[in-house]
Amino acid sequence: MSQEPLQSNKQNFPNFYRTVPSEKALYAAIIALLKHFGWMWVGIIYADDDSSINAIKIIKNMIVESGGCVEFIKLVPSINDYTPERIKDIEQTIARSTANVILLYGSKNNVYYLELNVHVTSIPGKVWIHTADSSFRIFNVVNDTVVNGSLRFIMQKNENPAFIKFVKEVNPSRFPSGRTFTTWWDELCENRCPFNPRNRNCTGVESGRQIIWSHCNLKFTGMSYIVYNSVYAVAYALHEMYQETPLSERLQDINKLKFQDLKGWKASPERQIIIKKEAIVWENKFAKLLMPRSVCSEKCLPGYRKSVREGQPVCCYDCLPCLEGQFSNQTDVDVCIKCPEDQWPNVQKTECIKKALTFLSYEDPIGIVLACIAILFSLIASVVLGTFIKYQNTPIVKANNRDLSYLILVSLMLSCLCCLIFIEKPEQLTCFSRQAIFGITFSISVSSLLGKTFIVVIAFNAAKPGNNLRKWVGAKVPKCIVFFCSVIQVFICILWILLVPPSTSYNTQSEIAKIILECDKGSAIAFYVILGYLSILASVCFAVAFLARKLPDTFNDAKLITFSMLVFFTVWIFFIPTYLSAKGTSTVAVEVFAILASSSGMLGSIFVPKCYIILIKPQKNRKNFVLKGSL
């Protein structure tokens, strides 16, 4: 009647026949019970014998494979090895345990002495799972209480009505003599049946159903019923074999007879554990719950992922929110899922939703501010232009080529207005025109300043006796400079548009939860070539103006141009790193700000001082003041 799984090996045990299920069925039942209640965090106490040691190794692996964890494994001492230190160690292990479910694996004797010495069932808040068939009987004898919610696995039982008849009629003399049997018989039916068959009346045995723990209990214990079935199985098998085999063969081959597979018990794979939860009375601690819980960590809700604590079992983890751009829509996920590029997780990070399409527009506060500044500066440039046209015949306007002054003011006005193209929904046409208009208008402005500076230098040197530069003094040279320098920029822009034209693109990486509709420049090199060419023009203009700054004050535009170029360089030097570090709509805003800052710098540095004299100090706007250098 052994349940040892190793004895199922027919090579090592060819003549072993089971009349009881292997303990493997018990292992599977334990795992099914734990999974049914969701008890993924358990403690184990087992007996110090080979069978229990082998069983616990298998059960632990099965618990881990099913997703559970074992908090502790404690060995129950041998019957005579209970010392105060061991008792205290077991008590503290159970008391400190966070697992609410403890598996007690061992025989009834192990369980009895464990309870007798440690009183494990008196530790509150624990659900005990027993594998010893009579463990509840022993607990009741010791504590006279029932451990609510504790569960046990028992052998199948059944009644045998003929047992009472056997007790009344059997002659004890047919049994082996000895004190052991006599003692057993005295305890039989609670001493209600005397040993002497002549005086035996077995008073009260007929009501054996109410003799709960007596041998007369008609509902046999599991082990008794297994013995009963085993004996009858062998008896019937021998009887059948005896009848089917001829007498001559029986006599000749009596030593060769082998048992057949009686199939007294076979595992049924389709059988499932059935639990009536409403019939279980849980301990008071769990009264407020539908059932006890035993987990190391509570489930991670959707929107979170598990992060196993270092050095602890996988059942012990922290719940961390999913990272940016990730979501989880199930409980207890190990890894969050990344949303598609055009989607973003909701606030709870339980699902992905479409990203909002955005761009720098007039509805954004920064877009409104930049648009207002652009319009303001363009109006200021137009007012200055109108002022210069109105006072075109005054000396300060006529100095250094008033046509170039008009051209600079117009180009600055257009530079400011081109910023409005940046503050709207990007389309194919606007993407073409943005950088081209910006580059061309700025090249006209800077080349015009370069032309004005050359006029200063040429005019000053032409005034010296014997100098041949007089023929270069006039309007043609600066106009040629402006035309030539501007055409180069126009040529660069045309090549850019033809070879790698800018186009609209959807940027899903720059900003969180947004898709940036922007203009893809097509070629970053072409963009930086435009900026580089403007830098070359500005550098040449700055160098010439710096060399001409000490010329007589009659030609004081050189000083103003030098300062304006310093402003220009300062703006664009800070622009490059800021532009490269900006993301999304901030990139466009930085470029617009750089255009407006450099335009306003040139407008303020060159024309504000002149407007001050024209409007506020008109007495200085005379030829004699200009000639005296009193500007």
Image (cartoon, helix red, strand yellow):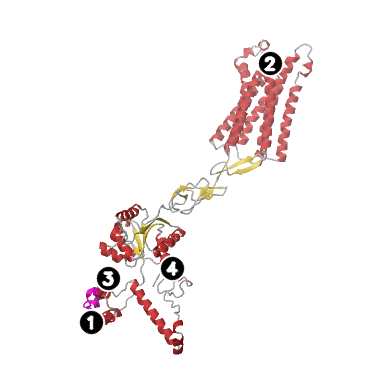
Query: Label 1 to label 2, Cα distance in Å?
Result: 148 Å
Q: Where residue 48 sits in the image (x, y, percent)?
A: 37, 61
Give the mark toward the camera: 2 or 4. Answer: 4
How many labels were placed on the picture? 4
The image shows residue 580, relative to residue 17, as above or below, that is: above
Quarter of the view holding residue 525: top right
Callout 2: SS: helix
Query: Label 1 to label 3, Cα distance in Å?
Result: 23 Å
Q: Which residue is identified by label 3?
A: 213
The image shows residue 524, relative to residue 186, as above or below, that is: above
In primary-sequence order, the first of circles 2 and 4 is 4
Image quadrant holding the C terminus, namely: top right
Q: Which residue is identified by label 2?
A: 555
In primary-sequence order, the first of circles 1 and 4 is 4
Q: Which residues are magenta?
A: 186-207
Q: Nearer the viewer, residue 399 or 585?
A: 585
- Other-residue count near label 1 (Cα within 10 Å), few / some / many at <14 / 14–19 / ≥20: some
- The three-letter amino acid code for the residue at tag 1 is Pro
Q: Where residue 265 sits in the image (x, y, percent)?
A: 42, 74
Assess whether residue 243 is covered by the magenta stretch.
no
Q: Which residue is identified by label 4?
A: 5
Query: Label 4 to label 3, Cα distance in Å?
Result: 30 Å
- The three-letter amino acid code for the residue at tag 3 is Trp
Query: Label 1 to label 4, Cα distance in Å?
Result: 43 Å
Give the mark toward the camera: 1 or 2. Answer: 1
Query: Label 2 to label 3, Cα distance in Å?
Result: 125 Å
Q: Nearer the viewer, residue 72 or 360?
A: 72
Q: Which residue is identified by label 1?
A: 197
